[in-house]
Amino acid sequence: MEKHDAKRVAIIIEAIMESRLREALEGAGVTGFSVLPVLGGSGRSGNWRRDDTVSRGGGMVQVICIIRPEKLDRMLEAAFEVVDRHIGVVTISDCQVLRADRF
């Protein structure tokens, strides 16, 4: 089975910023991503849990994209325009996919 190199980008951001991040990714040519709720964590502000937040704005989501390596820089520039001004973490890792035509 043939495997193809790709990049996996995971972005954790405030839930209230999800729609702006989606728009930025789509504008950069990202054709697919998944959004997952973040249940809790710990960071500069200490521990937190999604259950303890009062509003939608207090929660976090993780947006995961798998893209071709040549699309990475454009995607990161668009995402950073959103993440730079808000709470957020961006990670990039190498991965392989079986159906490259989907990315």
Image (cartoon, rainbow, N blue to C red):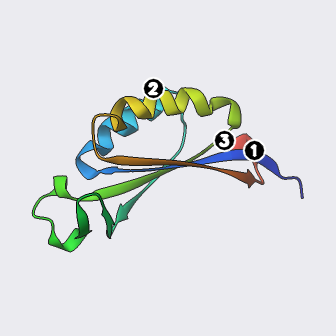
Q: Do the residues labelled 3 and 1 touch (CB within 8 Å)?
A: yes
Classed neighbour count for the residue bearing mark 2: other residues with Cα under 10 Å, few (<14), some (14–19), many (≥20): some
Q: Residue under circle 1?
A: 100
Q: Is mark 2 on a helix, strand or loop?
A: helix
x, y percentage for residue 94?
69, 50
Between 66 and 91, the one lying in front of the other is 91
Q: Residue under circle 2?
A: 27
Q: What element carries label 3?
A: loop
x, y percentage for residue 16?
23, 47
x, y percentage for residue 45?
23, 59
- Image-quadrant location for residue 103: top right
Q: Can residue 60 be seen in this view?
A: yes
Q: Are marks 2 and 3 in contact (CB under 8 Å)?
A: no
Classed neighbour count for the residue bearing mark 3: other residues with Cα under 10 Å, few (<14), some (14–19), many (≥20): some
Q: Give above or below for 85 relative to 90.
A: above
Residue 71 shown left or right of residue 29 in the figure = right
Quadrant location of the N terminus?
bottom right
